[in-house]
Structures are given as C-alpha cells and as structure tokens.
Amino acid sequence: MGKLDGKTAVVTGSSRGIGAEVATLLAGEGAAVVVNYRQKAPRANKVVAAVEEAGGKAVAVGADLTQAEGVDSLIGAALENFGGLDVLVLNASGGMETGMGEDYALKLNRDAQVNTLNAAIEHMPAGSRVVFVTSHQAHFINTVPTMPEYEPVARSKRAGEDALRELVPALEEKGISFIVVSGDMIEGTVTSRLLDRSSPGAIEARRQEAGRLYSVEEFAAEVAKAVTMEAETGHTEYVGGADYFAK
C-alpha cells in the first residue's frame, strides 16, 4: 500500500526536471498524477509513459498557467480523469526566459500560483495538501542578496510565496494544509544553466560557498516527502544551503 493510494496529485511544470521527478515519485506512492507542461508535450508524454509502465496512473495536460483557461483545463483534467484532487504541488516557475515580456516573472511566479490554488481549493477535500516549491535565493531575498541576474525572479517568487501564505486561513477553514519547500540552487536545472550562461562561474561559486548542491533527484525526493510529512500548515522545509542561516 502506498501512502497516496486513491489520491490524485497535480504537479505543475512537471514535464522535466524537478517536477517530472516529483510526479514520478508521487505515482510510485499510489497517486494518480496530472503531469503539466506548457509547450513540451513529448517530454510530458514520456513522464506519463514511465509512470504507466511502472503500473501507475498519469495523464499529460498542456496548460499555460498564466492564462485563466490554462488553469481551468489543468484542474479540470484532474477531475475528469481521476475524479478528484487531493494534492497540489506548485512547482512551475520561470522568469529568465527571453521574449516573454517584462512582467512575465510576476505573472508566472505570483499570479499563476495564486490563480491555480484558488481554482483547486474548490475541489480539494479536507485532509488535502498544497506544496509550494521555491528557492533559498527567493525565500531569503529580503535579507540575503542573490546574484543580480536572478534578483527579479527571486523577488517574484518571494511575492508568490507571500501571496499564497495569505490564503492559508482560507485553506485551514477547508482542512487543507500548506507547506513550503525551499532549496538552495539545484544542479542541472534550467535556471542554474541559464544563470551560469549569463554569469559564467556563478554556479561553481555557489557550490564552493555551500559545500555542495543538491541534484534534481535529491531535491525532488524532499518535495515528494513534503506531500505526506507531519507538519503544521505554513511550515517551511529547508533543503541544503545551511550557510543561509548563518547570514
């Protein structure tokens, strides 16, 4: 028996990287998983195929969460395919992409997070859980400076976290818990590659400062654990980056 047998999980931004690993791990615990992608359908379908080959249930859903119709189609897919929604992992983020507009980071990292959660709340029963995935660079941005290239994204993600925390009382009324997982820079993510491209040596410098950086697989395992961990609503689970707490 898996910890999530009979449950349905939506993982945003899960066609690759951390989200894909989280979706796979939750499926391994028995959850039926909605794999969300914005453009990369083949990658999302590959995640679904791997889940199904292992005996799990999954469906891929293309949805741009900065658009209202994208949010509706994502939440609707959980209901239509699996009959409910018990876990929402808010993993999708961005803002370093080119050609997306100056306000794209806030649209995705704040507005889309809030809109997705608001749409999901109406369908999540008591005992459900919401997990928001962020970075130390964003979580601590008001007290610990980050790389200049990443600061606009970090501030938009912090704004997203703050906006989601404002919804905690409404979640508590419905018996839904809310957990934040904050991690140091992760090896091999799109963000780390973009940062290293714009500021060569930045990731190596952070690696030296932190001692080591978590891999995608290691961090995803911590996010997946947060779905079933015993913790008070509003709890923040910190992964790596111990030096942040000494600053």
Image (cartoon, rainbow, N blue to C red):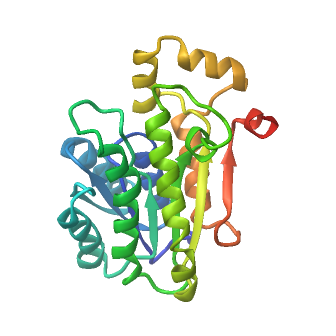
> Is the residue 127 above or below the residue 112 in the image?
below
- Of 201 and 138, nearer the camera is 138
The image quadrant where one finds the C terminus is top right
**Where is residue 218, by image quadrant?**
top right
Image check: 219 left or right of 212?
Answer: left
Image check: 156 left or right of 179?
Answer: left
> Is the residue 37 above or below the residue 118 in the image?
above
Residue 227 point in image, percent of width and height: 57, 64
Image check: 219 left or right of 102?
Answer: right
Give the tally of numbered discs: 0
- Of 224 and 146, nearer the camera is 146
**Residue under the image location 45 percent in, 47 percent down:** 156
Residue 243 visible within the image: yes
- Of 200 and 33, nearer the camera is 200
Residue 167 point in image, percent of width and height: 51, 74
**Residue under the image location 69 percent in, 38 percent down:** 240
Residue 25 visible within the image: no
> Is the residue 192 above or below the residue 180 in the image?
above
Which residue occupies the extreme right position in the image?
Answer: 246
Residue 3 point in image, percent of width and height: 57, 70
The image quadrant where one finds the N terminus is bottom right
